[in-house]
Image (cartoon, rainbow, N blue to C red):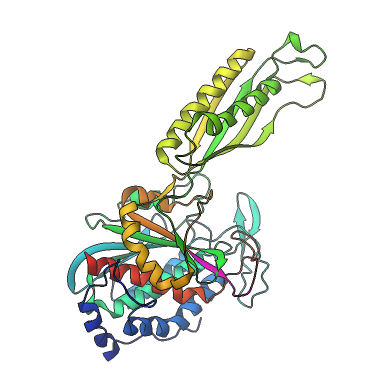
Amino acid sequence: MNRIPRLKRTGLVMAIAGLLAMPMLAGAASSNTLPAGVQSLVEQVTPEVVSWRRDIHQHPELGNRETRTAGLVAEHLTSLGMQVRTDIAHTGVVGILKGAKEGPVVALRADMDALPVTEDTGLPFASRVRTEYNGEEVGVAHACGHDMHVAILMGAAQVLAEMKDELAGTVIFVFQPAEEGAPVGEEGGAALMLKEGLFGDLKPEAMFGLHVMTSPLGEISVRSQGQLASSDQLHITIKGKQTHGGMPWNGVDPIVTASQVIMGLQTIPARQLDVTNTPSVISIGAIKGGVRGNIIPDEVVMEGTIRTFDNTTRDEIHRRIERTAVNIAESTGATAEVKINKGYPATINNPELTTAMVPTLQRIAGDKFREATRSMASEDFAYFASDIPSMYFFLGTRPEGQALAYPNHSPRFNPDEGALPIGVSAMTALVLDYTNSH
């Protein structure tokens, strides 16, 4: 990659010192941009952000295998004079920027991994990478936009490093592997980073993350409390007694029992939980049992997913699923074995932090700021949000005038790079507003 030389410290940085002398309180009235000097730094770094994004896009790597991406990030953070740690949770990178002034500790996060998807965008920098995944040869592509996230955070790191002498507090830049999940048999992602002592004694007071979406270009959206759902895997085995299909009374039919269990599960979110608290979904996506139409089998296996936006409700749903399945099976003479593999918790935006920082996002987005709708997708930023007061927001990347766009995880997902400087501005503004108001 032809890299643009890193910005030199100039009088431009000193010119913004006066602007930062007065705290930019999150709730204060202001224009829809960063202060002029900070905005100029964002504009100067934008070509390099675009270059990084295209380079990372062309060289995607799956979770726990992001060695090249991590190397690029570590080299950049080191060149900015930061304290840099590598090999956290396999390939994670952390940069620590200490401002010249006393202030709080704030963390920013970007995820680095790509997906086992064969790209079909036709871009000149499209991925041609192929690798092995779960025993199969697959294409690899940044079909979820994590290349955008990495480039945005590298850009914000450069802008904030240029402002080190005026910066209050400490900023921790977290470049995380394996957000899409670790390879089978491995740990990874945010949970492993925390397990390995990511922050140590330097625990942040607040943490921010973003995700690009196919909403209109430049739209920024966020909501308090549950924004992304928890995601748990459900496995139920119904055991009956095999018999002839024409004489079902001689056995116990696990297929009929399974159908009753499926219907019973739907009464949990619809009839047993307070639906005004949070939406929840229990879905069975696979049923396996039997080999022939006139033989009632011994066993039926069901697999599904459980989603909700509240982690207390999540635990209650798990309890009720087991009770429902076991009791219905027992009433038919069958037995039910329930296994729930916990995935990501719900991503909960801290209410106080979100209220305080929404004006910052409004200032950056202008009339394109929205309250986010909940999404039943899940995200392992949730582990950070469970440990640290956090705010996670969405950034729109659908080109102007385009009514529809291919969604995240599509082989044709193609976010507009015009969102890159907006993301850099948002991450930078969140740090400046938070540190200067605390």
User: In the visual, does 222 lie left or right of 86?
Assistant: right
| Place of residue 405 in the rendered image (x, y in percent of width and height, measured from the top left) | 64, 66
Q: Which residue is at a point 24% across and 74% down the rendered structure image? A: 167
160 is higher (above) or lower (below) than 94? below
Q: Which residue is at a point 52% across and 28% down the rendered structure image? A: 321
Range covered by the magenta-colored residues: 395-401
80 and 327: which one is in front? 327
137 and 262: which one is in front? 262
User: In the visual, does 210 lie left or right of 38?
Assistant: right
Q: Which residue is at a point 26% across and 69% down the rendered structure image? A: 25
182 is higher (above) or lower (below) than 157? above
User: In the visual, does 185 lie left or right of 295?
Assistant: left
- Regarding residue 416, the answer to whether it shows in the image is yes
- Regarding residue 170, the answer to whether it shows in the image is no
Residue occupying the far bottom of the picture: 11
In which quadrant of the rendered image does the C terminus lie? bottom left
| Place of residue 107 in the rendered image (x, y in percent of width and height, measured from the top left) | 32, 62
Mark count: 0
303 is higher (above) or lower (below) than 255? below
| Place of residue 254 in the rendered image (x, y in percent of width and height, measured from the top left) | 68, 20
Q: Is residue 59 magenta?
A: no
In the picture, residue 361 is in which quadrant? bottom left
In the picture, residue 294 is in which quadrant? top right
Q: Is residue 396 magenta?
A: yes
In the picture, residue 28 is in which quadrant? bottom left
